[in-house]
Image (spheres, helix red, strand yellow):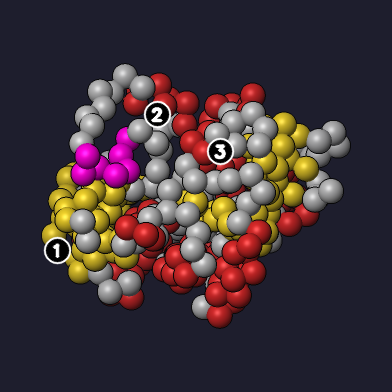
Amino acid sequence: MGLADLKEVLETFPRRVAKELLVGMETPDDAAVYELREDLLVVQTVDFFTPIVDDPYLFGQISAANSMSDIYAMGGRPVTAMNIVCFPCGLDLQILAEILRGGREKAEEANVLIVGGHTVEDEVPKYGMSVTGTVERENVVTIDKAKPGDYLVLTKPLGIGLLATALKGGLLAEEEMKDEILVAAQLNKAASEAMVFAGVKAGTDVTGFGLLGHLYEMMEASKTSAEIWLDQIPIWPKAQEYAEIGVIPAATRRNRDALAEWVLTEPGIDKFWLDILFDPQTSGGLLISVSPEKKDKLLAELSQKEVACRAIVGRVDSGQPGTTRVKKGER
């Protein structure tokens, strides 16, 4: 569902206040944080989607990594998961077995126990997980703590949505995007641990609303604005090519239309850049807001943990809350 439609529906939803609910629906954070005891905070999230690749095993891997990403984005550690499966009646059950095998192996990599799940019949396969984790109180990362002067660090390249659309359209073979698929299947565990180690308090992961959509949520919640530097944005090979010829997901247009008034671009910036910045990411990286004093510590720890992408893509400012200025570079 698009950002604007979702926001319209949620604004009519009654909010229940509880002192134990430390992070809930009052902000569009990646997961909820609930206090069971003073020394035990629980993090909960759920996510599932349709295949972005043809290989069912890789789809299971990517979807599981994506589902656990919300826990990592909050500075937490996933502990248990429950499978969510929608599967067509009559489709080869070996396909489902491979999807679940991919999800199980990714959960094992994260030291997460799959404890059950739920299945329904559907015309289109869908897979994901409901994930429960824990987080220490001092390590909770939320979207409303960004401060003017913070740098914005991105831990995976952009463009997977464009490539997946090209794949579905027969313009690209799965073998041609094997590097991108492997990165989409990577856990955000190492990036999360580096973020916590550096003492970061503000961040999110980049998924269906694209970089600019999730940045908007962070800036609005933090009552700040941002600037993005195009010469620092990491993108996958061929993503620009498909953006330039209009091979873009429908969600890209929804994201762009929903936030048109909140994005200001410098004169002379090519249109394809907005399609890349609004491209819905499946199992994208973390977007971390880090103070100048902690930036070097974060980057060093990301390097130590072999997080290949650690791009400084912009900075937080004190302008109109929620706005982002897209610039060619820092100046």
Front disc: 1 or 3: 3
Q: Is residue 24 magenta?
A: yes
Q: Looking at numbered disc 3 in the image, what kind of residue is underneath it?
A: Met
Residue 275 occupies which quadrant of the picture?
top right
Q: Which residue is under mark 2? A: 6
245 with respect to 78 (left or right): right
Please tell me which of labels 1 and 3 falls first in the chain. 1
67 with respect to 307 (left or right): left
Residue 43 occupies which quadrant of the picture?
bottom left
Label 3 to label 2: alpha-carbon separation: 18 Å
Residue 219 occupies which quadrant of the picture?
top right
Q: Which residue is under mark 1? A: 115
Q: Is residue 285 visible?
A: yes
Q: Looking at numbered disc 1 in the image, what kind of residue is underneath it?
A: Val
Q: Are marks 3 and 2 in contact (CB under 8 Å)?
A: no
Front disc: 3 or 2: 3
Q: In the rendered view, tell whether residue 309 sits above or below residue 280.
A: below
Q: Position of residue 13 (x, y in %)?
A: 28, 23
Q: Which mark is residue 97?
A: none
Q: Position of residue 324 (x, y in %)?
A: 66, 36
Q: Is residue 69 visible?
A: no
239 with respect to 110 (left or right): right
How packed mark 3 is, by other alpha carbons closer than 10 Å (few <14, some 14-19, many 20 or more), is many
At 45% from the left and 65% from the top, the residue drawn is 196
Q: Which residue is under mark 3? A: 219
At 70% from the left and 46% from the top, the residue drawn is 228
